[in-house]
Amino acid sequence: MKSINVVAAIIKKDNKIFIAERGYGEFKGMYEFPGGKVEKYENPSDALKREIWEEMQAKIEVDALFYHVHHEYSDFILEMDCFTCHLLEDHLVLLEHLDGKWVDPYAENNDIVWVPADIKVINEIKKRGI
């Protein structure tokens, strides 16, 4: 089965994190931690900065690796490195997502429908804290 390597940003501001609603593909309408594929020539941190700029015109500082997700979908395996980050400027423009919001990761947030792999990330945040 094909394996895809991606990076995701857990963007923190005050006591909240930023999540984005996918605007395309199989998981359109579900929430995720923004990010994307790592190109062959990139290190994960640079890939994450590029992806966040391309998707949101936002500049971030990557703070630390928080969690690695291995998730098997029906047609591929996702390997996702999730990094805590913060904005360098208080500026986000959603170019690929339908919606974005700052949420308290410890609140119930029962109205949020997560992309399957990202459920593991939010559960780890609740377990370990950020």
Image (cartoon, helix red, strand yellow):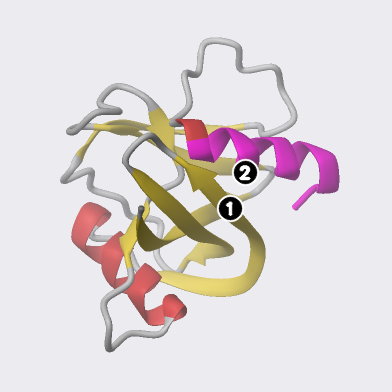
Secondary structure under badge 1? strand
Residue for badge 1:
69
Kind of residue sitting beneath label 1: Val
> Secondary structure beneath disc 2?
helix
Q: Please name whichever residue, 69 or 74, is drawn nearer the observer in this view of the structure.
A: 74
Q: Is residue 63 left or right of residue 19?
A: right
Q: 130 or 14: nearer the eye? A: 130
Q: Main secondary structure of the magenta part?
A: helix
Task: Tell me residue 25's x, y (percent).
Answer: 19, 33
Please tell me which residue is depicted at 69% across the width and 43% down the height of the picture: 15
The answer for how far apart the CA atoms under marks 2 and 1 are is: 7 Å
Q: Nearer the viewer, mark 2 or mark 1?
A: 1
Q: In the image, 34: left or right of 94?
A: right
Where is residue 51 drawn, in percent x and y?
Answer: 28, 64
Q: Residue at x 30, y 28 (%)?
A: 27
Q: Position of residue 9 (x, y in %)?
A: 48, 57
Q: Which residue is mark 2?
A: 121
Please state which amino acid type lies under the numbered disc 2: Val
Horizontal side, residue 124 vs residue 10: left or right:
right
Taking 41 as reference, is 9 above or below it? above
Is 48 within the magenta?
no
Q: Outermost residue toward the front?
A: 1
User: What residue lies at 49% left-to-right and 58% top-to-bottom?
Assistant: 80
Task: Single out the residue that lies furthest toward the bottom.
Answer: 41
Q: Is residue 41 above or below residue 83?
A: below
Left or right: where does residue 110 sit relative to residue 36? Answer: right
Q: Which residues are magenta?
A: 117-130
Would you say the residues marked 2 and 1 are in contact, meaning their CB atoms lie under 8 Å apart?
Answer: yes
For label 1, the crowd category at 10 Å Cα-Cα, with few meaning under 14, some 14 to 19 and many 20 or more, is some
Which quarter of the picture shows residue 98? top left
Q: Nearer the viewer, residue 106 or 78?
A: 78
Residue found at x 23% / y 54%: 55
